[in-house]
Image (cartoon, rainbow, N blue to C red):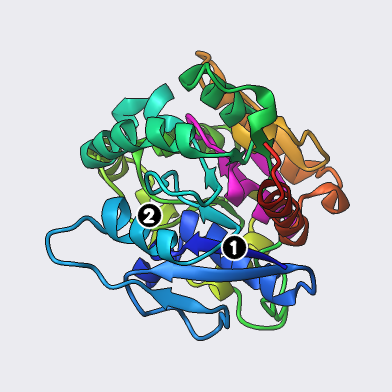
Amino acid sequence: MTTVAMDVRVLMQQSKPTGIAQYIACILAEYLKDKGEIELSGLSHINSLTSSFKVPLTVIPPKKGLPWQSFVLPWYLRAHHYDVFHGPAFSLPPWGFTPKIVTIHDTVFYRMPEFVRADTLVYLRRMLPRSLREAKRIIVPSKQVQDDVLKLAPWLSVAHIAVISLGADRLKDRVFDPHSPKMWDVPYLLHVGTIEPRKNLEFLLQVFARLLEMTKGPYHLVLAGANGWNNESFWRSYEQFALKDRVHILGYVSDEDTVKLYQGASVYLSPSHYEGFGLGSFEALWQGCPVISSPTGGVNDYRIGGLNVLPTQEKDSAERWAAKILEIITHPDPIERTLLPTWANTYRQHASLYHEVAHGGR
């Protein structure tokens, strides 16, 4: 039996899981279904693990004046035997003898630091080099992130890095009743994600405006996701948008409503400047919604039916996106759902890596 400790603080701290918290939650959910030789324990300084996860949770209380991750956690690991420690959110505790794995979800702090909150940027620039040196293996969600990590840490080799896609099927168990009242009775375009500069939502408004000019049709634009940071420019553009009554900003939505939004949308749009993976695009495809995405993250690793890749930087990009939307609505391509990654496979690859590191692998 390979014993694994995972830092689950991010999941503890989010009442509405997004991003990394969803990644941790999906790994835990698949672990509970698995009958393999992994024994996984969560480590945190907060005792608030949702009851839906029956994994053992060890609360390591903070000690006054001592940083939890830099001092309290390493001392705990020194006193308790685990075969592997997994840091699922960029960081690892220093020193100690437990072999460590770290997940690097994206490198936006390296590629586009202007899109990262100042405190997060300071933290990652301080923490990440140490994590990359401490880790026996590094998990990334796409080849693009792998390439960036190799540039950030030239002492690493490709063999140190495991590219493991995230799953598209997180919402597969959510029941969708096609006979229930629809959230929208008009054709709409959809984007799901935090409102922040990296998501390039001002460009999305330009695309939508061009679509309405081309068609005079009844289309609406729906944006679902929490209000983020440094997004004043987007809100100004929204307030000045001529047809803002057709733009619906919902805020954070439940998983049940997210399924309804995916399944009812005409097209899912992701014009992001940068994604480590691009989970929304893959979840939309799983729910049967065609996607137009900028060429970033996992989109570049999966060129499959239903996934349309268009750049956003060219002068005529908004025109091209609008034209592609019309093409998809008029002549939709079949979606190759069977080729999409699943969380079961994501977990199997994690478990295999845990075994490899526990038994002396790189």
Judging depth in this view, the residue of 9 and 298 nearest the camera is: 9
Task: Find residue 192 and name its label.
Answer: none
Q: How many marks?
A: 2
Residue positioned 33% across, 40% down in the render: 241
**Which amino acid, mark 2?**
Asp
Q: Secondary structure at mark 2?
A: helix
Residue 251 visible at all: no
Q: Mark 1 and mark 2: span between their CA atoms? A: 51 Å
Residue positioned 53% across, 47% down in the render: 100
| Magenta highlight range | 268-296
Task: Find residue 245 and name its label.
Answer: 2
Callout 2 crowding tier (Cα within 10 Å): few <14, some 14–19, many ≥20: few
Mark 1 and mark 2 residues within 8 Å of each other at the beta carbon: no
Q: Residue reaching furthest top?
A: 315
**Which amino acid, mark 1?**
Val
Q: Position of residue 274 (x, y in %)?
A: 50, 31
With 30 as the anchor, is 153 left or right in this view?
A: left
Above or below, 270 relative to 153: below
Residue positioned 79% across, 69% down in the render: 36
Task: Find residue 4 and name its label.
Answer: 1
Above or below, 152 relative to 268: above
In the rendered structure, does residue 272 fall within the stretch colored magenta? Answer: yes
Q: Position of residue 153 (x, y in %)?
A: 49, 21
Quadrant where the image shows the C terminus: top right
Judging depth in this view, the residue of 166 and 222 nearest the camera is: 166
